[in-house]
Amino acid sequence: MATERTLVFVYGTLKRGASNHTVMAGQQFVGEARTPPGHRLFVVADYPGLVRDPTDTRGVQGEVWSVDADALRTLDRFEGVEEKLYRRGPIPLLPPFDTASVDGYFYLRTVRGRRPLVDGVWPVRVVPVG
């Protein structure tokens, strides 16, 4: 029996090499992706918040992952879906993912006073081991 899988767009601390990437352990990296303009990242704390923003002209860079049902539940908990910190829902992406059904996590709290990332890229700081 095939395991149900969901495509998920991650754009911050869950990306490869980022501080919380271990949450993605055992899941399948599909490829790098970008949203169309109209989506923006804000620095919320030591993590980003993605919001729809019609004034944005760049979009958001991230990665698409294929995750199983257990991992999806883990991601929802990690992102604070039940606490209404983030909402998981369909997110449009540029080719080659423009025809795929992909979910993303949208930040639900105010971004007033938060710094936007004008290039739409959350920096990954890889810490050397050893």
Image (spheres, grey):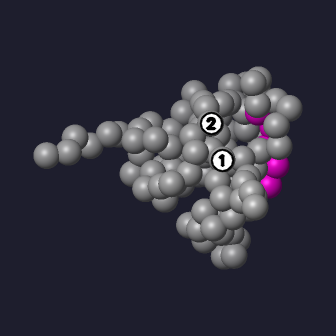
Name the residue located 83 percent from the left edge and 43 percent from the top edge.
Answer: 101
Q: Is residue 90 above or below residue 61?
A: below
Magenta stretch, residue numbers: 88-93
Q: Quadrant of residue 30?
A: top right
Local crowd at mark 1 within 10 Å, few (<14), some, or many (≥20)? some
Residue 91 is left or right of residue 48, and the answer is right
Secondary structure under badge 1?
Answer: strand
Q: How many numbered marks appear? A: 2
Q: Quadrant of residue 32?
A: top right
Q: Position of residue 109 (x, y in %)?
A: 68, 62
- Along the polypeptide, which appears first: circle 2 or circle 1? 2
Residue 66 is left or right of residue 87, and the answer is left
In depth, the one of 34 and 27 nearer the eye is 27
Q: Position of residue 67 (x, y in %)?
A: 64, 54
Local crowd at mark 2 within 10 Å, few (<14), some, or many (≥20)? some
Residue at the spot of label 2: 30
Q: Is residue 92 magenta?
A: yes
Residue at the spot of label 1: 66
Q: Position of residue 41 (x, y in %)?
A: 62, 42
| Mark 2 and mark 1: Cα distance apart in space | 7 Å
Q: Is residue 50 above or below residue 23?
A: above
Name the residue located 51 percent from the left edge and 39 percent from the top edge.
Answer: 122
Name the residue located 82 percent from the left edge and 37 percent from the top edge.
Answer: 100
The quadrant in which the N terminus is found is bottom right
In depth, the one of 106 and 56 nearer the eye is 106
Residue 130 is left or right of residue 87, and the answer is left
